Image (cartoon, helix red, strand yellow):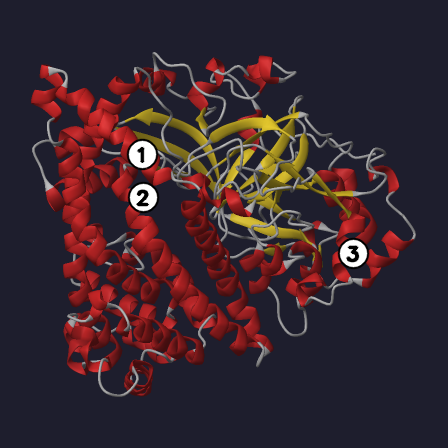
Amino acid sequence: MFSFFKRFKLNFFLFTLLIILSGSKILDEGMFPLSEIPGLNLREAGLKIDVKEIYNPDGVSLIDALVKLRGCTGSFVSEDGLILTNHHCSFGDIAAVSSAENNYLENGFIAKERDQELPAKGQSCQITVGYSDVSKEILDAAAGKESSDRIDAINKARKKLVEEAQKEPGIKAEVSEMFIGKTYILFKYLELKDVRLVYAPPRAIGEFGGETDNWVWPRHTGDFSFLRAYVAPDGSPAEYAKENVLYKPKKIIPVNPDGVQENDFIFVLGYPGTTYRNRPSEFLKLHRDVRLPYMQQVFASIISNFEELSAQNLDWKLKLDPQIKTMANTEKNYRGKLAGFNKVDIIGQKEKEEVEIEKFIAGDSELRNKYSGLMQKIKKEYEPLNQVTSINLFGLILSRFSTTYQLGELMAEYMSAKSLPDQNRPNIFKDKNKAMLQSTIDELFEGYIPEADINQFKIIVADAAKRSEFRDIDVLQRFFTNRPASVEAEEYFKSIASKTKLLNKTAFMELLNLAPEEFAKLNDPLVAMYKEFDKQFSSYAEIAKNAEGNLNSLLADFIEVKKLYLSSSFIPDANSTLRLTYGYIKGYTPADATYYKPFTTLTGLIEKSFSGNPDYVLPPKLKELWKNKDYGRFKDEKLDDLPVAILYNLDTTGGNSGSPVLDAWGRLIGLNFDRAYGATINDYAWSEAYSRSIGVDIRYVLWNIEKVGGAHNLIAELGVN
């Protein structure tokens, strides 16, 4: 259940989403699917180019320059496949090529020649090349099925469609749920697998402010990096090879080195992650009362411990920093969401609306026959989810962050798959994907720190011991004794680690060659631990799956009746598919008697560096350039300073990191990388009053490249004179 391994021009079919969204006037806030772009009031809002220059289903447009990275967005900014994205999106790639001798994470990296660019192992970029409505295929497969059977049928149908689509060379596919239980779209991406690191600023610039400033305005972070995409000599996608050649994108986004001013119109294209605005109040309560506090508290404890370990050993630091960064970003985001729920009564507003929806249903005989008791049925399905969510998250943390657990899981899953015909095995275990399996094993062992795994296990077990919902879980009972649970957990984990053969890479590789029955005779304690935990937690996963299966059809009804109640439609929640959002460079008032301007400056950055906070350390060269007021052509005359970051009222979320911020002429003026603290609640509701997103100003990016990094080759490649 928690399995680590189970987890052409844009010829878009406008008909699909236009039908879904027809009959309504779309509000100007939102993450709009591409099919909605022609119907938006972009010209009236301030756009200076033809809308078809943004999205043209019959030709090349700006969206052809967008790439989907691992949880982020990037864009092509040169005809030689140069990609601009956030520093934090490349953080793991930079850490992976760093060492004590060449610490590119701390000191930065510059490839002044193409042959100096470093492979970003495991990174790929995906370019959307088409999509089609597959709702009928999915819903036909699920017809008449309930609970987990419905989820299984949907997943099976989705998998079949994806496998069929991926028979096309170089294509990666996924079926995205646009409206839960209602609308499904098959997206096709051209996947480029040879991605190389070109430029990364020193960490003191790329991560300036650290966790002190994360999710906070004013910001002064130079959150940018450059990658480059390569393909085989024949132009087809290929793994890294020296003979590969530059990828030539259909479209690039031109850079505007003059930037923008307050109140200027801007828009963002990107791949926003997940929002929940179309979910009922019970879903929001589940997040507010269970999911968010559990993850926030556990992550906070793990982060603190990992930071202590990092301080002891540079090698550990390079391995743990990407994990710390990921968890810290989530932990603070969840804290912001919880604060947002206290400040903004989103749940109360939804509850009032749902009462009115119930009255609306009761007042119409046809609706009453079809939807009577709908809200009560939905509430009933969320009751078991409130009981099992934190338990399932416990297993998820183990499966995602514990290398020890992952290695036991990998071996157990591999031996199970080995007894199946090759075509029935999970992808990673198929004969044709041996390189993928090897890469996964290499990555696990490269990042393995026994002390980190032990401490993480202690922390989540000790936390579980304090929670009533964990008391009846048999697999955890051994830890809930008179002694502290953390002590019991540590002894247990150390005992497993000392007896297993799977934590030695050479032994692990040799054991892979055994037949399943031969391996079973070894009774490896780590595999036994994984199976014991997985069996126990699978029963809780099944409870959640049953509820989700029932909710799949109930929430489809909820969307349909809500559309009737409002006499209008609404856009689907974000789901990592291409979206557009637009608005203005704009400050705001987050608290009484406080106004935040929409630009920060280099002078403000320097002022922070005098505070003594270790998150505000700066390279001496940057300070020297500021002292000499050496801003070059990138100085803003109105500010009388070099702009660093920008604030705007666009609608963004996770996944929009690295998204290009574009001016009215479609030119790059910044990179989106964050939201203000009060806007973390955006995932549940957007508001002009508190929803602000943050980007790094392109002028600060260019100034760093030229003045701090001395990468004049990149300045020339970007066409900046």
**Residue 586's quadrant in the figure?**
top right
Secondary element at image label 3: helix
- Crowding at dot 1, Cα within 10 Å, few <14 / some 14-19 / many 20+, comes out as some
Three-letter code, disc 3: Glu
Q: Is residue 2 visible?
A: no
Would you name the residue on which mark 3 appears?
A: 607
The numbered mark at residue 284 is 2
Q: Residue 150 falls in which quadrant of the image? A: top left
Please tell me in which quadrant of the rendered image residue 190 appears: top left
Residue name at image x 45 percent, y 66 percent? 300
Residue occupying the far front of the picture: 593
Q: Dot 3, how many residues are within 10 Å of its Cα: few (below 14), some (14-19), or many (20+)?
A: few
Would you name the residue on which mark 1 appears?
Answer: 350
| Tag 1 and tag 2, C-beta contact below 8 Å | yes
Task: Please determine whether, in this image, residue 25 is positioned above or below residue 265.
Answer: above
* Mark-to-mark CA distance, 3 and 2: 40 Å
Residue type (three-letter) at the residue carrying disc 1:
Lys
Which SS class for mark 1?
helix
Instruction: Please tell me how crowded label 2 is: few (under 14), some (14-19), or many (20+) other residues with Cα within 10 Å.
Output: some
User: How far, Cα to Cα, is label 1 from label 3?
Assistant: 44 Å
Q: Position of residue 395 (x, y in %)?
A: 28, 64
